[in-house]
Image (spheres, helix red, strand yellow):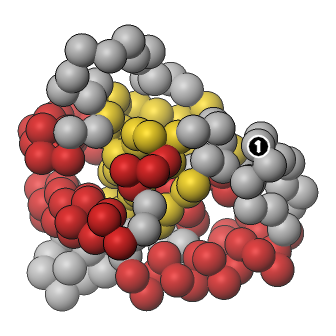
Amino acid sequence: PLRGRSLFWTDALANRTRQSARVGVLHGDHVIVVHHVFRPDDTVQVLEVGASIPWHACALGKAIVAHLPAGIRDALLDREHGRLTGSTVTGRAALAPALAAVAADGVATDDQEAIVGEGGLAAPVFDGAGRVAGGLGITGPAERLTGRSATALHTAVRECARGLSRDLGARRGSPAG
């Protein structure tokens, strides 16, 4: 249901932000991209459906893990986290506060943690039982997705994730908002 319901929301998000939009689910300690919408421009792009990314190195993974039950989140934090780039955040001491910030703000970020030059923003998507079902986010050039200029992008990602969550049955007032 997550992928099917995400089609409208990812198209809208890609058009609104002019960035690539993705939906992912947690599988073990990786995020699997289940839906991907290209940036609406003429640049060369690669379809990412099926891509497997370590959860700690992408905004999608952080958005999902920040909203998991404490026991599952702790087990993921206690595992070893490899570096994909020089900017990859690793280790419990660095990841735990980052996840707390995501839980408070509702949007996760990554700044060149999986791919040099690429950044991401993502928000959790919740199902009708209030459980995190996956994440919805955008990726693009890091300089476009970080800093003060990214405030409108944070809002767009958060709003689309809330809309998708409501489509999946999440109620207003739940973590999905």
Q: Which residue is mark 1?
A: 85
Seen at 12% across and 46% down, the residue is: 16
**Which image quadrant for residue 117?**
top right
Left or right of 112: which side holds 146? left
Q: Is residue 25 left or right of residue 123?
A: right
4 relative to 85 in the view: left or right = left
Q: Nearer the viewer, residue 126 or 15?
A: 15
Residue extending farthest to the right is 80
Figure label count: 1
Element type where label 1 sits in the image: loop
Residue at the image point whose x is 35% and y is 46% from the top: 138
Within the image, what quadrant is residue 12 found in?
top left
Query: Quadrant of the image for the C terminus?
Result: bottom left
Q: Quadrant of the N terminus?
A: top left
Q: Residues within 10 Å of mark 1 (few under 14, many from 20)?
A: few
In this rendering, the answer to whether 148 lies above or below 87 is below
Res 41 quadrant in image: top left
The type of residue carrying mark 1 is Thr
Is residue 131 visible in this depiction of the protein?
no
Q: Residue at x 64, y 38 (%)?
A: 116
Q: Residue at x 66, y 84 (%)?
A: 97
Q: Above or below — where is 118 with respect to 166?
A: above
Horizontal arrangement in the rendering, residue 46 relative to residue 152 (left or right) = right
